[in-house]
Image (tube, rainbow, N blue to C red):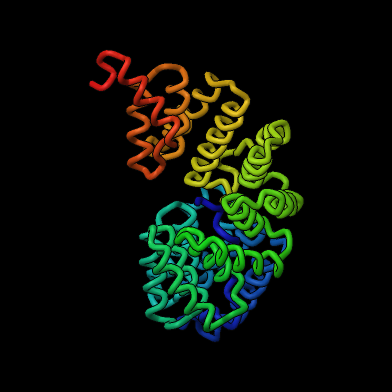
Amino acid sequence: MHIVVFLLASLSLADQQTPRQLPPAQGSVQDRLVRVRNDLFSASPHLPDDVRELKAILGADPRSVEGHLLLGMAYRAEGTQELLAEAVAELRQAIEIDPAFSPARFYLAHIYLDLGRPARAKEELEAALEHAPGNPQFMASLGEAERQLKNPRKAVDIIRQALAADPSLAEGRYYLGLALFDSGQINDAIKELEQVVAQSPGRPEACLALGTVYIDAGRFDDAIKVLGQGTQADPSRPGLRIQLARAYRSKGLLDRAEAELARAQPKPNTTLAGSYVEHQQLEFDLSLEQGLIRMKRGQLVAAADAFKKALAMDPNHGLANNYLAQIYVHQGQFKLASELAARAAKAGAPLAEPERKLLEAGLAKTPGARE
């Protein structure tokens, strides 16, 4: 399950390491840094002003580790793809000046998670933990990196250690829910994610995760309720709309499902919630859901086109191959159906027995279809 990354947990001021090389003589600079830091961690930061101030500070003191850290954070918070490279460069500069400054590695790791590079995120988090052993936030994020590396059981173990150290860590509980889901522990995943939503009602990422798990558990009404909470908090988030459409389609409410998909057109290069990797996943999910709705309406040609679009983005996706194979079986295109069915089975999504028998019968009657 691809889920939007939870809003980056802010390190508390107590957790922030004071740059060792900042001399007391620069007290006025430190005061400016504190003001910018407080604004960045506020509910409504003034990002353009913060960026200008930080550039001025770094112009006066180019070796200010905290200055580079905060500028990297500000660039990341701006939310555009173009500024991600700038954010990475600033955080790298902070690490080059002080390799032991763990917060820079923490935020850099989260950018790598945004970019779909969990192996690089893992490297940064492991390096951060060398200088801050047992830090619960670093450990929870390391668990998320392991989950994205397809090691959900290892992720569960690491995140549980983080929560043992800090049971109130909301993002740790969120990551644990995702890891439990990926390891097949659906009920346990629901319990964890329900706690997150209860603590932060309407938080879009948590609502999206819980709603998605509810759908997989067949709890469609619960999914619609919690996903609706998420859309109230963030009406423009396409992932919520796509999952709402999935829930409505699963209940047979096709008109409502199509209405949600109409609101779910993801826009690239807008915010980090629309980062390239995630944008591609949203496009895939949108095409797959469009195909399923059209398939349920009996619009097989339109459904096939949607599944083909999805497979162009992920050729080995088991269910997409399965659905398109079913359409080809019913259209009598048995050779194509057989190729797709083989891919689906390899990916763990084999045809159901009735479709498999229809395919076998069609292949038997079609000369050369098995070649």
Q: Quadrant of residue 28?
A: bottom right
Which residue sits at x=59%, y=83%? 14
From the viewer's side, name the closer residue of 104 and 300: 300
Q: Say which quarter of the image contains residue 129.
A: bottom left
Residue 64 visible somewhere in the drawing: no
Q: Position of residue 367 (x, y in %)?
A: 27, 13
Relative image position of residue 141 (x, y in whole percent): 48, 68
| Residue lying at 55% horizontally and 57% vertically, measured from the top left | 5
Question: As drawn, is 181 to the left or to the right of 264?
Answer: left
What percent of the width, then of the height, locates residue 356? 39, 31
Instruction: Work out which residue is located at the far left of the displayed protein and give it.
Output: 371
Compare residues 287 and 89 and report the one nearer the observer.
287
Q: Nearer the viewer, residue 271 or 19?
A: 271
Please provide percent x and percent y for residue 254. 69, 32
| Residue sitting at the far top | 367
Above or below — where is 58 with respect to 268? below
Residue 163, image quadrant: bottom right
Horizontally, is 3 left or right of 118 in the view?
right
Image quarter in which the C terminus is found: top left
In the rendered picture of this protein, how many numbered marks are placed on residues?
A: 0
Where is 276 relative to 321, above or below?
Answer: below
Note whether 278 is above or below 30 in the view shown. Answer: above
Which residue is farthest bottom?
24
Q: Is residue 305 visible?
A: yes
Q: Residue at x 73, y 63 (%)?
A: 201
